Each structure stands twice: as C-alpha cells, then as structure tokens.
Amino acid sequence: MILTGDEIQTRLGSDIVIDPFDESQLNPNSYNLRLHDELLVYEEIVLDMRRPNRSRRYRIPPEGIVLSPNQLYLGRTVERTESHNVVPMLEGRSSVGRLGLFVHVTAGFGDVGFCGYWTLEMFAVQPVRIYAGIEICQIFYHTVEGNIREYCSDKYQNNHDIQPSLLYREFRSEADERQMRFGFGQEPPDSGD
C-alpha cells in the first residue's frame, strides 16, 4: 500500500525523514524532491564496471544548463531522506517526463532504512535546459509486510554527495573472497567438468 501525503506528513520524524521539508512540495500520495546545483559527468568513453570511472563536476548556473542527448548526467536531490518501516521509491514528475528527461535510468527503488541524498541518473531524449532547485522528481512510500531488515551498505548509505557507481567494490569483494579461499595466485580446483 502507498502512503497518502497526509500519512507521509504524520510519519515525519519517526518512519520518515525529509530534510528540509516544505509542505508546499507535498502531494496527495508523494513528496516532490528538488534538484541540487551540481552534476557529475563521466569522462570515460567506455565505462568499466570493474574500476572507478573518472568524472567531472559541473555547477548549474542561475540561467540553467542544457543537457545533451546520449550523455548520462548524475545529479542529486537537495533533500536528504531517511526511511524506517516503509520502502521509499522515486519517480520522475510527469511534467519533467513530458520534456523527454528521464530522472532515473533504472534505480528508483529504495530500501527500508536508506538514509542519504538520492543520486539521480538523468538522460535527455533531446536537448533540454534544467535549473537548480526545480522540483524534479517525487518520492513515495510503500508499507512493508514481514520481518524488516534495514538497508546497511558501505557504498551508498549516509552519503553526502552525488554518488557515481561503486559497483567495482563488488568485484573486489569477489576477488578477495577467491584469494582467501584458494590462496594468492592459485586457481580454484578443477571441478572435473
């Protein structure tokens, strides 16, 4: 079940934290989040999952900045959110989508217990000018059934900035585990296939 706007406001300070909170951004069953004034753009032509990829930081000037097609822009929300006993989800606003701007390429699903700023994976279908402070997306909350185990991660939890992909850390974990199990420089035993 999705929480109503009134229920989101009722749960502020307990199950839900939105900081800063402005009642004018509250909707019937969601809350609008604003775009911060910085963007990250990857500098690599080919992105590699196994290693950190270089990126460049841009500040959105008062006159806005034009996003180009075929380029991924990472941004973040102005608001820091926290959720307990509910699942946060993020969607682009329909007015933004109607300009051909995807606000999150694939990662709109949050976890119970997530605390931090939302990194936005923005992609424009055609050139579009964006502005810092615009209400760019909306967060909504689902209730949860069953035992709750809160999100705990050293990758994205309690972030304070735009978060580029940290997927490479998972590859390191796999390599470290193999090294611990089979020793440095040794291959796992042949399975006999």
Image: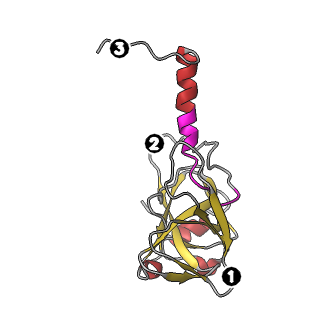
- Residue count near mark 1 (Cα–Cα under 10 Å), binned few <14, some 14–19, many ≥20: few
Residue at 67% over, 66% down: 57
Q: Provide the secondary structure element on which disc 3 rests.
A: loop
Q: Amino acid at mark 1?
A: Pro
Q: Quadrant of residue 80?
A: bottom right
Q: Provide the secondary structure element on which disc 1 rests.
A: loop
Whether residue 29 is situated above or below residue 168 in the rendered picture = below
Q: Which residues are magenta?
A: 160-172
Q: Amino acid at mark 2?
A: Gly
Q: Position of residue 179 (x, y in %)?
A: 56, 21
Q: Is residue 108 magenta?
A: no
- What colour scheme was applied to this rendering of the protein? secondary structure
Q: Amino acid at mark 3?
A: Ser
List the residue tagged with mark 2: 146
List the residue tagged with mark 3: 191
Q: Provide the secondary structure element on which disc 2 rests.
A: loop
- Residue count near mark 2 (Cα–Cα under 10 Å), binned few <14, some 14–19, many ≥20: few
Whether residue 186 is situated above or below residue 24 in the rendered picture = above
Q: CA distance from mark 3 to mark 2?
A: 39 Å
Label 3 vs 2, first from the N-terminus: 2
Residue extending farthest to the left is: 193
Q: Quadrant of residue 115?
A: bottom right
Report the disc number at residue 61. 1
Residue at 62% over, 59% down: 55
Residue at 58% over, 47% down: 166
Q: Is residue 181 visible?
A: yes
Label 2 vs 1, first from the N-terminus: 1
Q: Nearer the viewer, residue 95 or 186?
A: 186
Q: Position of residue 46 (x, y in %)?
A: 49, 54
Q: CA distance from mark 3 to mark 1?
A: 59 Å
Q: Is residue 171 magenta?
A: yes
